[in-house]
Amino acid sequence: MLNLNFNLYNSVLFAGILQGIIFAIVVLINKKYNHKSNFYLAALISSFSFNNLQYYCADIGLYDSTFFYNYVFIPFCLIIPVYFYLYIVQSLYPENKITFKQKLLFVPFYIGLFFCVLYKLFVGLNFREEVLNFFYPIPNIIEFLAIIFNQIIYVIVFFKIKKFEK
């Protein structure tokens, strides 16, 4: 039997996850919020909620960290800043379309997702220990690089907002 760790922190986190998913669904289905910026806001909130859901399930003890990284982990941390950036840009300049250069911001997420799927495939196919040891730190490296990527995006957004205010 599972010994799950429910506490106040986890309860608040779970409430936020549910609220985020419900908010995203309402924004996406309601015609009143039919704006490009609201789409990116819903994508941001749902990505954030699913990212938190991954860690919530690990924190309450639904699975251990090995199972989490071997089978569950999806690098939402790399797509959250992209949706944040696109939400801000579309809020400030709703008439502008997303450029190719801005679409390139999705590349780190796709690269991270590729390596995570590759690692899960290697684990599932029971590859040799040497191969798995090479790929083992990849989820942690992705999370570390996501921190740097987030900070870069936040600085870019800051300057975009400052430029818009002038």
Image (spheres, rainbow, N blue to C red):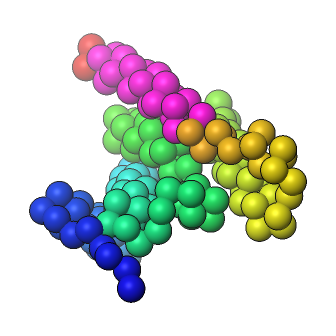
Answer whether residue 25 is visible to the viewer in this image: yes
Q: Quadrant of residue 92?
A: top left
**Percent coordinates x, y for residue 63 in the rendering:** 47, 68
Whether residue 161 appears in magenta in the rendering, the answer is yes
Quadrant for the N terminus, please. bottom left
Q: Quadrant of residue 17?
A: bottom left
- Residue appearing at x 39%, y 20% in the figure: 155
- Residue appearing at x 68%, y 44% in the figure: 136
Whether residue 105 appears in magenta in the rendering, the answer is no
Name the foreground residue: 2 vs 17: 2
Quadrant for the C terminus, please. top left
**Percent coordinates x, y for residue 88 in the rendering:** 37, 38
**Percent coordinates x, y for residue 34 in the rendering:** 37, 64
Answer whether residue 121 is visible to the viewer in this image: no
Q: Where 128 falls versus 141 (above or below)?
A: below
Q: Where 131 falls versus 46 (above or below)?
A: above
- For the record, the magenta segment spans 141-163
Name the foreground residue: 3 vs 145: 3
- Residue appearing at x 42%, y 24% in the figure: 151
